[in-house]
Structure formats: C-alpha cells, structure tokens
Amino acid sequence: MEEILYPLVSKFNEYLSNYILVTLLVGVGLWYTIKTRFVQIRCFGEGVKNVFGCINIFDKTQDKSMTSFQALATAVAAQVGTGNIIGASGAILIGGPGAIFWMWVIAFFGMATIYAEATLAIKTRIIEKDGTIKGGPVYYIREAFKGRFGKFLAGFFAVAIILALGFMGCMVQSNSIACCMQTAFGIKPYIIGILLAVTCAIIFIGGIKRLASVVEKIIPFMAALFIIGCLVILIARIKYIPETFYLIFKYAFAPQAILGGSFGHALKTALSQGAKRGLFSNEAGMGSTPHAHALANVKNPHIQGTVAMMGVFIDTFVILTLNALIVISTLYTNNGVLSNGYTETVMEILNKTNLVQTAFGSVFGNSFGAIFVAICLFFFAFSTILSWNLFGKINAVYLFGKKYPLRAELIYTIIALGFIMLGSLVSSDFVWELTDMLNNLMVIPNAIALFALTSVVVSIAKTNKS
C-alpha cells in the first residue's frame, strides 16, 4: 500500500508546496508586513521585553489557562522540533545551502503572519463560566465567515490539524527520535515507541496545567544545550563561517551550480524546499501555534502578538540558523563530503536523518556527535509531541465534544498514543510526505481567514503603537 500511495502523495504534495504554499505563505506575510507597517521590525524590541522581561518558570499555572511565557513555551515547543534538525537538513540536502536563505525570507514575513494569528486567537477566544478557554483558528475562521461556508472551513481545518499534527505529525517526531536513538545508542525502535507513549500518556492525563509546567522548563534547557553545542562547533570551524554565508547566498540565486539541472528547476527546488521546511519549522501561517497563544493570560491581544513573533525569531533565526551553519560549514566547505556536489556514492550514505549527526561528528567524533544530536532531537521532538497533541485535542473537542468533551479528549488521546507508538516503526520518507501534505492543507483555510480579518488585526496594531 505504501509503495502505491507514496508517489501519489509525493506528487500532490509537490504541487501544493511549489505553487499554492509558496504563494499563500509569502502573500499573507507580505500582506501583513505592509498592513501593520512592518510590525516585526517596529515592535521587535517590545516583543523581546514582553518575553524576557517577565520570565518566571515558577508562576502558578491555572487549570484552564497559561501565563504568557508558558503559552510562548508551548508554541516554541511546537515550532522547535525535527523541522529544525532533520527538516532543515532535508532542505539543505535537496535544495542546497540556498534553501536556508528562502527559509529566512519565509520567517521574516512569517513574523507578521504569526502576529496576526496570535492577536486573532486572543481576540476571538471564548472563555466559559468555569474558566475554560476555547480559542484557535476554528474560532477566528467562524468569526471571519458566518454561516455554512465558515462552518465548512473551520471543520476542514480541524480535521486537517488533527491528522497533520495530532496523528501524523507525532509519527514524524517519534520516528525521528527512534532513528537517532538507534543510531546513537543501538536501542530498538519499538522500545523507544513504548517509552514515548507511556511518558506522553502521563503528561496528557495531567491536562493543560501539567503540560504547561513541563514545556516551560524543557524549552530553555533544550535551547541552551543545543546552542552551546553549536557554538563549540562554530568556534572550531570559525575560519569557514564567511564561506558558509557566501554559499547560502550564492546557492539561493544560482542553485544549479550544486544541484545540477536547469537554472529554473534548481531555483524552484531551492525555493520550494525553503518554503516547505520553513513552514514545518516555524509554523507561521499554518494555524497551529494560535491554539497556545489563545490560552495566555494577557491584558490585550497585541501583547501576545509581539510575544508570538519572538517564537518565530527563536525558531528560525537562532535554532535553525545555527543548525544550518553547522551542516554547511562542516560538509560543504574545505573539501567536505558535499563540497564537490552530489555524487551518487555520497548520496547513498547521507540522508536528511543522519546529515546533522555527520556534521557534529566531524568535530565531536562520530560516536559523541551522534549521541549529542540524539539527545537534542529527543528533547526537541518530545516537546513538539506534547504541544501538537494539545492543538489536535482542542480541535477534536471542537468537532466531537460539544456534549461530552471529556469523552472526546479520552478517545482522541488513545488514538494519538497509538500513532506515537506506530511512528517509531514507520518509514520516515512516507511519514514526512503525509505530514507535509496535511500541513499544506491546513494553510488554506487559515490563510483565507487571515486575509478576511485584516481590518481587525490592523486595528489592534494601530491601537498599540510602538
């Protein structure tokens, strides 16, 4: 069955990512960048202050909501996952070093997009009498379009996100963890799958309070660990850093020099890989992280909008960029294994899963490099599983839990745990293709609603001038 479905899904996904996805991502980001008068630049300092000026991981979490930092941590947990390590590596491997440039472009405009998503999530959320908060794209989609059309778009989005993140997305994360753990420690994938499923079940049962408490502590630790490791590599390869940036910009506009083929095909490959993996990495415009931001206890939507922008900045311009610099500076410079282009022998050995381990191993040694990457990827992917499960659960309750929300949550959680277990055993390429396709489909209803609610976002941005 997989042999039949894989080429069909791949072809359909290629069309979505090369045409529809690039157009929507750049279009929405550019639109809100202009309409908000470059809010990602104008309010950048405010965003930094709102995030780092009030961090307190010992804040008391309410049962039904989160602090602003916890909401950001939950959003960043979703953003900083395998997309930053394996996804970015896949983009570099398939689209060349220039794909990273297009990731930066997507992320810059994405900061304006995610500002809009977060402000709308706060603006349109519903707070029940018992303090339960209902918020996310399905609610601002219904606000944008009344009647059957809005109901259809919201339902389409809810189904897509449940499949994309709650189920297939978690398969990607657990598959990536299992592959790296097997390479680094020789642990059987099914053992990793069981351990992940049990650990996640304990956290899921604890609800929002337990999840928020876990992710707000994991995120600073895992980010610091990865950044320190990257800085050690970059210091060791310091003389190749100028060449690394040169390669990124060179192959962004002349990718055929390393990818081969015609200029048009190579450029389309580099750009589409940057856009596709950029989306999977920072999730701006996809409609996932607004679920976390909707739960934040803030005075007004603008505050959480600026906080949300920092999530994209941390994800792409810090974590993903450091990872890209490591890969390119070790493998594409100074007679690295990919410095002379993609020969058949090299491509038989390297793939997007082991590319980062190979890069770290070139300085740390193969054994320690594989172990370090496996540990980092575990924390990245594990925290992403926690956040994505929450996002899927919110939409499962929206679709099926109007009368019996707890029953809907329980059934959804059991199915999600099954996918986490299954993901450790399933072929990585097919899972990535399915996840990419569903991610792309999520963008469509979310982007339509974002365009429709432009006046609401612009009003919020104007009211809170920096």
Image: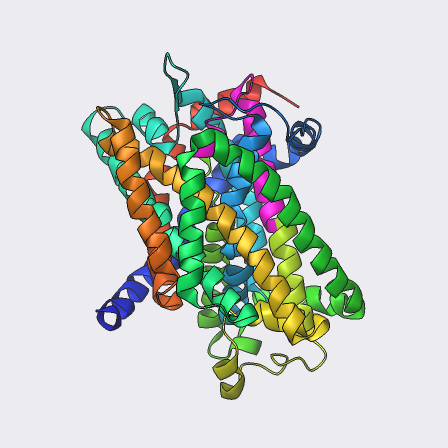
Give the quadrant of the C terminus. top right
| Observer able to see residue 247 | no
Q: Main secondary structure of the magenta part?
A: helix
Judge from the rendering whether residue 227 lies leftward or rightward of residue 134; answer left or right. Answer: right
Judge from the rendering whether residue 14 lies leftward or rightward of residue 332; answer left or right. Answer: left
| Residue 99 part of the magenta segment | no
Q: Position of residue 61 (x, y in %)?
A: 54, 24
Position above or below: 422 against 159: below
- The residue stretch that appears in magenta: 291-316
Judge from the rendering whether residue 107 lies leftward or rightward of residue 168; answer left or right. Answer: right
Where, by quadrant of the figure, is residue 245 drawn? bottom right
Q: Position of residue 209 (x, y in %)?
A: 48, 29
| Observer able to see residue 42 | yes
Total label count? 0
Q: Residue at x 53, y 44 (%)?
A: 77
Judge from the rendering whether residue 219 lies leftward or rightward of residue 385; answer left or right. Answer: right
Position above or below: 90 against 344: above
Give the quadrant of the N terminus. bottom left
Where, by quadrant of the figure, is residue 376 drawn? bottom right
Where, by quadrant of the figure, is residue 320 drawn? bottom right
What's the image's color scheme? Answer: rainbow
Q: Position of residue 184 (x, y in %)?
A: 56, 69
Q: Residue at x 28, y 47 (%)?
A: 415
User: Which residue is farthest bottom?
Assistant: 345
Between 403 and 327, the one lying in front of the other is: 403
| Residue 302 part of the magenta segment | yes
Position above or below: 316 against 51: below
